[in-house]
Image (cartoon, grey):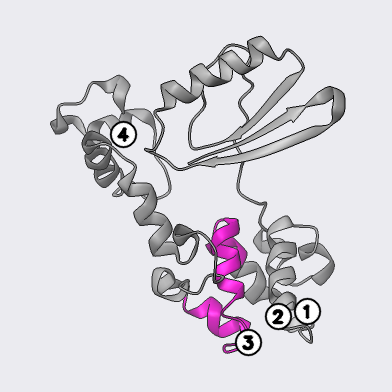
Amino acid sequence: EFDVLLINAPVLAWSRYSIPSGVVPKSTLAALAVQLLRELPQLQLLATSRESLRVAGEAVWCVPPLDVPDVATDGSVEALMRHASVQLLLARIQQRNPGFAFTQDQCASIAQLCRRLDGLPLAIELAAAQVGPQSLAQVASRLDRSLQLLNVGARGGLPHHQTMTAAVDWGYRLLSDDQRALFMRLSVLVGGATHEAAAAACQDLGLHPDAV
């Protein structure tokens, strides 16, 4: 999905358009961007997507996960509150449960949740929705079954934002057959890997090393 923000700098006017994946070819979107920027020199485009438009003058910024606490800060409320992942988790919990108070005895569970969810905003929001019916410690203890646990999204949101399973399925469906085969092989490399290790795991797929 491409989410495009058109900003007309001189008058500070802007318009936003969401273009679902597969509806308009990426080459068509790129050509449209080039034409708009050529005819409207003051125009700025802010496009969010899984990949760049690859047009001249484009600046690409990869949005990283939220920072997570390390083990050394588990016991300190003040230290944990410096991390964006903790701030988001607590904000969403308190949004649903206004009486929720962050206490010292919850530090370990909150830090564990943020680390185990890798600072991913969607996963953190879905975990926060579980707090109330369950305690923080209970939610943290169930993370080994995270796809079953993270299954309550906001009503009215995008379908692939409703559960982590839906998010994974949505991303998987966007892959080509070769990319899906590659994805399955890379799943055995827990914790990341070098390019050489990834190429070795996929060598019988008939893919060129540069495609890995």
Of the image marks 4 and 1, the number of the one nearer the N terminus: 1
Single out the mark in the foreground, 3 or 2: 3
Of the image marks 1 and 3, the number of the one nearer the N terminus: 1
Please name the amino acid that badge 4 sits on: Ala
Which residues lie in the magenta part?
Answer: 114-142
CB-based contact (under 8 Å), mark 1 and mark 3: no
Please name the amino acid that badge 1 sits on: Phe
Marks 3/2: CA–CA distance: 14 Å
Mark 4 lies on a secondary structure that is helix
Question: Image check: 157 left or right of 27?
Answer: right
Residue 42 image position (x, y, % from top left): 77, 17
Q: Which residue is mark 2?
A: 106
Q: Which mark is residue 197?
A: 4
Q: Residues within 10 Å of mark 2 (few under 14, many from 20)?
A: some
Single out the mark in the foreground, 3 or 4: 3
Question: Image check: 82 left or right of 31?
Answer: right
